[in-house]
Image: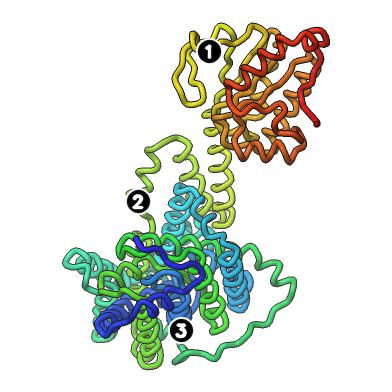
Amino acid sequence: MKTANPFVPAFITCMREGYSLKLFRADVIAGLTVAIVALPLAMAMAVASGASPDKGLVTAVVAGFFISFLGGSRVQIGGPTGAFVVVIFDVIQRFGFNGLIIASIMAGMILIIAGYAKLGKLIKYIPYPVITGFTTGIAVIIASSQVKDFIGLNVDNIPADFLNKWYVLLTNLDKASLCATALGVLGLATIIICKKVSPKIPSYLVSILLISILAFAFSMPVETIGSKFPSLPTGLPTPVWPTFSLDEIRQLVPSAFTIAFLAGIEALLSAVVADGLIGHKHSLNQELIGQGVANVASGLFGGIPATGAIARTATNIKAGGRTPVAGIFHAIFLLVFLYTAMDILAFIPMAALAAVLFMVSWGMSDLKHFTQIAKISPSDRTILFLTFLLTVMVDLTVAIGVGVTFASLLFMRHMSRSVEIRRQNHRNEYEEQDGESVTDDEIEIPEDVIVLQINGPLFYGFAAEFCDKLKSLEQMPRILILRMRFMPYLDASGENSIEDIIKICREHKTYVIFSAVRSQPRAILQKAGIHKNLDGAIAVDFDHALDMAKQLLADPEFTRKHIDPTVHHE
């Protein structure tokens, strides 16, 4: 797989490699194909987020252009996605659309800083159960929010809270519209059938066209985009810097970080999927920079947050798109639709958009992986359901924070269980000496020497047990050898536990020898001042440590004084 250059947009890389007329034709066709798919999705995502459909189209045009032009992936298609729906809806409800614009711009700046700080790799450490849990939770929320339009329920002020929302929906089913429900079911069936017949059919567009024609031809009394949003603007608005106050910025910081987090995760997941399909590796940090610029630009043009869209990216690849030019043309074609088709789009029934969003929710839910993770282990199952329930019942930000924290704690517990302290003395059992299998006949450990071998990282999850192991000895030896060849990592807690062991040994006049200390633990011990001269009480290997111990035991001065020179400060 070819690797992309860091901090160089994929567009520039492709142009440097040479751009042919054949590639141009393929990219134009792919761009038109993706634009046809993105048209209904962009409007549906905006409506589900509590904004007007034109905001979705503006986002797909502006953000889609910059994601392709400045991003690190060759085939990434950007625009509004389902991941943002919950956050956008909440911000609009609390701070208005101006607050959303500020949050989008702030999120864009966060992504740009993260890209230049090379923080893109950190996103890879988000546990998969957390990602699956909150994306499935978002899917449930999106689907729930579309029930009203799908069945044409004539009820105002439906609560945002999940349980209260369903209580209102279920207690007002008698107010549903049969016409809207029939159109919604037909639209959903059309999408499913088209996907079964051929993936190349733009199923969302076919469904919307069919439902719109039927509703118009038979003058059905259903709510449409035009009736719900009577004054839709035509064309691209003039960019405007939003008005804001410091207090408003402080209140929007959590939402901005959530938007940036979601944009980063979905964009990089989409880019990874694309890498496997085209054989080129995206520039991870440049992708974050492109996403950041796109969100800033989208906010200035009055759009909503955007990120890489996995389904649209896959559509682009299947249609023949191989360079960012396809994504740029996708934005250009959507811009043409924005200027020429807004009057026609006003006839689209809301039930048709609800059917589209039901299918989007189904795709987001990823039930296959959800059930798969639930079967793997109790800890993964706990993280999955905890994140899912918090996303649906409480808040997306809380769900991510609690999910990641809980997953980290469980990981630390598992890691601490994998760390082992093995004791060796003169009655040595089968042991592995610095990578070689040996028996007790091959190791001669003096009677006044005890060896503790640390297998695994010595970190805060296990540091206390390390001290307990020493305290559990019936009698302290004259010399303690700490074998550290198999200890790859040492943190501050582990270093503190070593200091505690040194204090215990000093009290019992026990001499400590460190054996085969690896580079990272050695650097930590040196910075902590435990050894100013690393050639003192640190042996290069276990054989050297045993020789040191034997020489000390044979030294009459050492035997006479029996004092503790535990640490050399030469």
Residue 171 pos. (x, y %) = 44, 59
Q: Of 94 and 172, which appears nearest the observer?
A: 94
Label 2 – label 1 distance at C-alpha: 56 Å
Residue 229 image label: 3
Residue holding disc 2: 367
Residue at figure coordinates x 54%, y 37% from the top left: 410
Name the image quarter holding the N terminus.
bottom left
Say left or right for 520 vs 438.
Answer: right
Q: Which residue is mark 1?
A: 443
Q: Secondary structure at mark 1?
A: loop
Task: Give residue 48's quadrant in the image.
Answer: bottom left
For label 2, the crowd category at 10 Å Cα-Cα, with few meaning under 14, some 14 to 19 and many 20 or more, is few
Q: Is residue 300 above or below residue 259?
A: below
Of labels 2 and 3, earlier in sequence is 3
The residue lying at 44 percent from left, 80 percent from top is 65
**44 on left or right of 550:** left
Specify the quadrant of the image occupied by residue 550: top right
Eye-nearest disc, 1 or 3? 1
Residue furthest toward the left?
197
